[in-house]
């Protein structure tokens, strides 16, 4: 099955507060990097996104995901889980479709972390 793609979900995430600053307003949906969600040169599922202020999004891509996580003491995967929990609570995404993409994550540790969005 192809990774989940949804303009509607991307727009929903754009309206959420920034995962780092909490500032509301227009944010960029950032696809988490460095967790093997997308494979080589493949964009991960749209489920694996988090809202970031535009300047922080640009900084993450310029400096790299490891530097960014160290700088802000937040892992992208934890921000993704928080975003997914909110979307599930708001009824924006379907649990069954999300579970398909979570099961496709090959790293068991990351898959277990993502499954926490259902708790």
Image (spheres, rainbow, N blue to C red):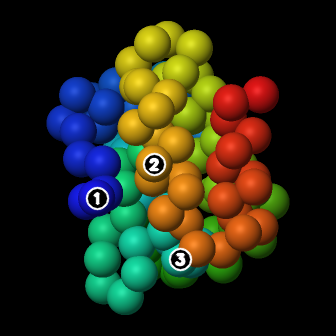
For residue 91, say whether it is visible: yes
Of labels 2 and 1, earlier in sequence is 1
Asked whether the residues under the numbered discs 2 and 1 touch, taking CB atoms below 8 Å apart as contact, a structural biologist would say yes
Percent x, y of residue 95: 50, 28
Q: Secondary structure at mark 3?
A: loop
The residue indicated by pointer 1 is: 1
Of callouts 3 and 2, the N-terminal one: 3
Between disc 3 and disc 1, the foreground one is 1
x, y (%) of residue 112?
75, 55
Which residue, given by chain and number where applicable, does mark 2 sit on? 100
How far apart marks 3 and 1 lie (CA) works out to: 17 Å
Crowding at dot 3, Cα within 10 Å, few <14 / some 14-19 / many 20+, comes out as some
**Quarter containing the N terminus:** bottom left
Q: Residue at x 47, y 40 (%)?
A: 98
- Res. 14 image quadrant: top left
Query: What is the quadrant of residue 92 in the picture?
Result: top left
Farthest residue in the top direction?
90
Q: Are marks 3 and 2 in contact (CB under 8 Å)?
A: no
In the image, taking residue 9 as reference, residue 93 lies left or right, namely right
Q: Say if 71 sits above or below 45 in the image.
A: below
| Residue that label 3 marks | 36
Q: Position of residue 56 (x, y in %)?
A: 49, 56
Looking at this view, is 71 or 106 the one in front? 106
Q: Separation of disc 3 and disc 2 at Cα?
A: 16 Å
Question: Tag 1 or tag 3, which sits nearer the N-term?
Answer: 1
Label 2 crowd bin: few (<14), some (14–19), many (20+), radius 10 Å: some
Mark 1: give few (<14), some (14-19) or many (20+) Cα within 10 Å: few
Instruction: Check the image and report above or below for 21 versus 71.
Output: above
Kind of element beneath mark 1: loop
């Amino acid at each position: 099955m192809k990774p989940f793609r949804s303009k509607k979900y991307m727009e929903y995430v754009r309206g959420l507060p920034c995962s780092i600053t909490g500032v509301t307003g227009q944010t960029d949906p950032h696809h988490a990097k460095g967790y093997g969600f997308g494979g080589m040169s493949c964009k991960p599922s749209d489920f694996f996104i988090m809202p970031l202020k535009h300047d922080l999004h640009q900084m993450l891509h310029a400096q790299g995901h490891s530097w960014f996580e160290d700088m802000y003491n937040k892992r992208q995967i934890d921000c993704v889980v928080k975003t997914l929990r909110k979307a599930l609570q708001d009824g924006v995404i379907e649990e069954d479709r999300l579970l398909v993409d979570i099961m496709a994550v090959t790293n068991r540790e990351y898959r277990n972390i993502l499954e926490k969005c259902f708790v």
